[in-house]
Image (spheres, grey):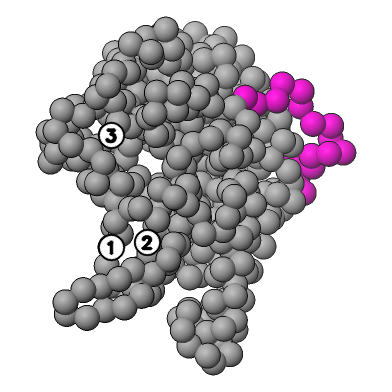
Amino acid sequence: MSTLLTKPPSPAAFDVARIRADFPILNLTVAGKPLVYLDNAASSQMPQPVMDRLRRYQTSEHANIHRAVHYLSETATAAYEAARIKLQHFINAREAREVIFTSGTTESINLVAHGWGRQNIKAGDEIILTVLEHHSNIVPWQMLALEKGATIRVLPINDAGELLLDQYEALFNHHTRLLSVSHVSNALGSINPVRQMIAFAHARGVPVLVDGAQAAPHLALDVQDLDCDFYAFSGHKLCGPTGIGVLYGRAALLEAMQPFKGGGDMIHTVTFEKTTYAPIPNKFEAGTPPIAAAIGLGAAVDYVNGIGMQAIASHEHELLCYATEQLAAMPGVRLLGSAQHKAAVLSFAVQGIHPHDVGTLLNQEGVAVRTGHHCAQPLMARLGVTATSRASFAFYNTLADVDALVAGIRSVQKVFA
């Protein structure tokens, strides 16, 4: 799925008040004002069922996994591997062994850069990225290109924040070895046509990695339908714990890759002369993994599935449309990024006021937004700014949260008037 629904759910189908009751942190006050949390692109909040599952593991199931035959280890192992199966179904991978647990999107991309890139990228080769990429989908490829003598080529965008697909074909040649592209821009919310881009790349024998950090919380995912070779995302943006993420990879590619890290549990045999590796996914999960976090991510997937990804997408789209309309009508406020297909992210600039000051004063109104370059400095340069303020919505946000943001911006403008 690469677009959001346009029809909002009926109240009977989506009860945001009931959902908010599952998030105790939303009851906080900041500077004496009710918390309005609009920094979900950086990290979403955790619902009570996820926290309860983490507590149950810590209080009655905690042990190291695999190999041991005692009760706690077997219980923890079963829960950990059950979480893997939940993630398999969440992204519709063919097999559970194609799901690798990592510390997050950044490690997932680095794993591919090291495990696949070092084997397959050589001097003179080219890697295609886009202007929309997060630093975590730029820097690993720059490091690899520097090491191997390869070149980075970049697909530009238009002023709306949409990829210029008419220039996409021209980037490919017989030196092209990889396309690595974000599914959704973290800074602008642009939803990229990754399925179309993947089909074009595959027709030329080029594998594709998709950075899905901002897509997994908002869109129904199907890696088989996308036909991507690798897909990476993080748990903490998906109502799960920090320190856990997923790398999906085609089994054949993963089997041929070198491990990123060596240690325990990723081996088959070890002698001082030679080590043979365990089958996937264990080959890429060296040492004690983030067991509790993986189990928590499995619980988070259960939670969002219980609401329904289509209902989530529709509610967030309603918030995006309302917020866009409200901010666009505000004098002195400039919206950045007006792609036709967007996730619930709004980057904006307030005339004459630095984003850091905007964020600081909004915080005094209880409104939490992100300010800065959003780990997307090449994109900021393309937009002609050094930083923006960013409001990013989740399914537990409300129209009243948008109203609070608008009122907060007006207060900021009055202070600087």
- Is residue 388 covered in magenta? no
Q: Nearer the viewer, residue 4 or 367?
A: 4
Residue 360 position, x and y percent, is: 38, 35
What residue is rendered at 84% in x and 35% in y?
11
According to the picture, the residue beneath numbered tag 2 turns out to be 284
Residue 10 picture quarter: top right
Q: Can residue 351 be seen in this view?
A: no
**Numbered disc 1: secondary structure:** loop
- Whether tag 1 and tag 2 are in contact, CB under 8 A, the answer is yes
Discs 2/3, front: 2
Q: In this view, does 33 lie to the left or right of 370?
A: right
Q: In this view, does 60 lie above or below 241?
A: below
Residue 393 picture quarter: top right
Q: Is residue 155 visible?
A: yes
Instruction: Report the Cα–Cα distance between label 2 and label 3.
Output: 22 Å
The mark that comes first in sequence, 1 or 3, is 3
Residue 77 position, x and y percent, is: 54, 76
Q: Give the range drawn in magenta.
A: 3-18
Instruction: Report the Cα–Cα distance between label 1 and label 3.
Output: 21 Å
Q: Residues within 10 Å of mark 3 (few under 14, many from 20)?
A: many
According to the picture, the residue beneath numbered tag 3 turns out to be 138
- Is residue 9 covered in magenta? yes
Q: In this view, does 22 lie above or below 396?
A: below
What residue is rendered at 22% in x and 46% in y?
118
Residue 225 position, x and y percent, is: 61, 35
**Numbered disc 2: secondary structure:** helix
Q: How crowded is mark 1: few (under 14 residues within 10 Å), some or many (20 or more)?
A: some
Q: In this view, does 219 lie to the left or right of 255?
A: right
Type of residue at label 1? Lys
Q: Which residue lies furthest to the bottom in this view?
A: 70
According to the picture, the residue beneath numbered tag 1 turns out to be 261
Label placed on residue 161? none
